[in-house]
Amino acid sequence: MAKNVVSLGEMMVQMNPIQEGPLRHATTFRRYIAGTEGNTIVGLERLGINTIFITKLGDDELGKSILITMKGEGVDMNETTLDEKAPTGVYFIQRGYPAPGRTLVNYYRENSAASKISPSDIDESAIQEADLLHVTGITPALSENCRKAVDRAVNLAVENDILISFDTNIRTQLWEDGEAAIQGLKKPFQNADFLFTGTGDLDFLFNESSENKHIKTIKNKYSQISHIVIKQGSNGATLYSEEGKLDHSGYDVEVIDELGAGDAFDAAFLASKLKGHEDAKALKFAVAAGAITVTARGDIEPLPDWNGLEIFINEMEGEGELLR
Ligand code: KDG
């Protein structure tokens, strides 16, 4: 039977300019929907995992567009509510400028409907149905009530003996400093089985001088984590688990839109583990999913299914056989 994953967070409307360059001169945009946890949820659906997504959307046209899209992807949105008093969040991105291949984000999400998610929105039955709860460092940074909602979801997952995955996903605009983030993310850090992070996030969070020292700190402070995955963008990723250290180099692709790559990575890694794949395969699929996602615009649009992953890996590595 297919596994279930539950997550909570904010999906927004993403305004993505047709042209690269300073946003102040951008006049034509494509509209997408995106948001870190929701992206991972759609990625999991594409990989055959049943998903439940908990959020609040504005009772407006943009909120309905998100609801329709998520349902169309097969996500169970029964735990999601529409709020008549608060709007759906929006953000504008600036692609490829000033740093080629990189993206800057401008949020218009303060007091959005999703920022009002609170512990009472987390129904125990939704968590009980799941095999894994996925949370990130973005939702707890949106508001005090959002942080409490994430903490409640984590508590329920622990009580119901469900796996927890946590992506630190630091957005520096949303945290005062590293210490505030460590405090705000205490519950997920202390209870995660899978930790996804990156060197930039670790530098922000922990006052250490190298990846080895970061790993030592994490292992000391949060010894329950079984898999620590360090995402390195185009350079690939490194996994630290009970079996040791495993590296996978990046795939050389043209970057059109880097947003959403980390979420695609998490989805492929988690789907692989839930399907019982060994770590090396999970890491390969995850790096490939991230690479595929940067080659097209939008966060959820390019998310691959198993077939897409196999075609990509066979093309890039020339492996004559299918990997699944
Ligand atoms: O991972 C990509 C997302 O971070 C982005 O699309 C928007 O969720 C988002 C956020 O809060 O920054």
Image (cartoon, rainbow, N blue to C red):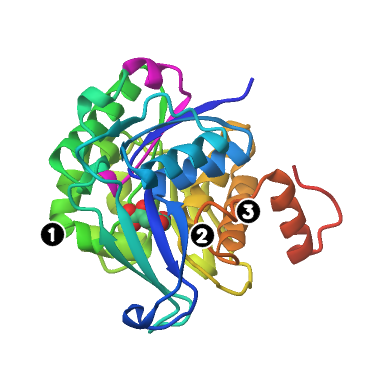
Whether residues under marks 3 and 1 lie with C-beta atoms below 8 angstroms apart, the answer is: no
Query: Ligand 1 closer than 8 Å to the CB at disc 2?
Result: no
Instruction: Find disc 2 in the rendering and name its residue.
Output: 298
User: What's under tag 2, amino acid-wise?
Assistant: Gly
Whether residues under marks 2 and 3 lie with C-beta atoms below 8 angstroms apart, the answer is: no
17 relative to 36, above or below: below
198 relative to 115, above or below: below
Which of discs 3 and 1 lies nearer the camera? The answer is 1
Numbered range of the magenta stretch: 124-139
Name the mark on residue 176: 1
Residue furthest right as drawn: 320
Name the mark on residue 284: 3
The residues bearing labels 3 and 1 have C-alpha atoms spaced at a distance of: 35 Å
Query: Ligand 1 closer than 8 Å to the CB at disc 1?
Result: no
Quadrant observed for ligand 1 in the rendered image: bottom left
* Mark sitting earlier along the chain (1/2): 1
Q: Judge by depth and name the residue closer to the eye, 285 or 127.
A: 127
Q: Position of residue 52 (x, y in %)?
A: 45, 29
Query: Ligand 1 closer than 8 Å to the CB at disc 3?
Result: no
* Residue 127 magenta: yes
Q: Quadrant of the N terminus?
A: top right
Q: Is residue 112 shown left or right of residue 129? A: left
User: What's under tag 1, amino acid-wise?
Assistant: Glu
